[in-house]
Image (cartoon, rainbow, N blue to C red):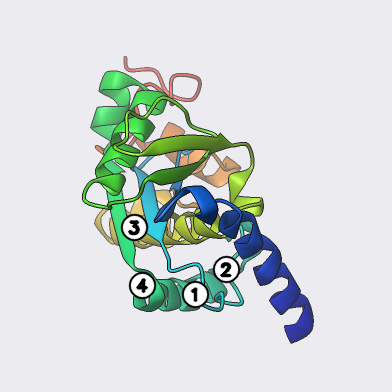
Amino acid sequence: MSKNSRTDRALELISHDRAFLSQSTLIAGMDEAGRGPLAGCVVAACVAFSLEEDPILWVDDSKKLSESRREKVYDEIMEKALYVGIGIASAQVIDEINILQATRRAMRDAASGIPADLFLVDAVTNLSLPGREKAILHGDAISYSIAAASIIAKVTRDRQMRSLDRVYPAYGFAKHKGYGTAEHIDMLKRYGPCPEHRRTFIGHFWQKE
């Protein structure tokens, strides 16, 4: 994508959020990574910018960016954002309270200490945050702040899965990040689960004898 196209895309995303400035003093975007995998935590991020400033050109839905690009944009977001919060719910917590409630808990933790009066959230509702909440379906493709949060959450989780790969090298976590690929399912059937597998997610592939 050309620089002009990237500029247009960044302005499109940030214009969405700027439309709320007439009724809000600080806007934060929230998203998560890792709701679907068979292993590992779910990570939520909350990001707030000064929206009057020029946008970071490569902020976009994290799924649209390569891993190397996400890493670079992650650093830019961490440098330029007013606030960045990260919340994490472990595989054990996911098994205890289910993935939706674990995601909500991680989002509340991510938002803790961020004095936003409006939280733009990718799809998830009923978070009981200190400011107003606006759930936006596919928000990471629409909102600049949510897109930034999607990158922070994704990079954070991917780094954790690469670390877990060194602890549990048999499963290939660095490659598939815990998602249910054919390779991952084969290793799960062969070796059984490790402590980072979500027991409530793997029943179709592994049954304890």
Q: Position of residue 2 (x, y in %)?
A: 78, 83
Secondary element at image label 4: helix
Q: Identify the residue shown where x is 43% and y is 60%.
A: 174
Q: Nearer the viewer, mark 2 or mark 3?
A: 2
Query: Which residue position is annotated with label 4?
Result: 78
Q: Secondary structure at mark 3?
A: helix
Q: Between marks 4 and 2, how big is the CA–CA gap?
A: 12 Å
Q: Horizontal placement of 125 versus 42: left or right?
A: right
Q: Which mark is residue 73?
A: 1
Instruction: Say which amino acid is labelled 2.
Output: Val
Q: Which residue is mark 2?
A: 59
Q: Earlier in the sequence, mark 3 or mark 4?
A: 4
The relative height of residue 205 versus residue 40 in the rendered view (above or below) is above
Q: Nearer the viewer, residue 45 or 35?
A: 45
Residue under label 3? 165
The local secondary structure at tag 1 comes to helix
Name which residue lies at 21% across and 51% down.
113
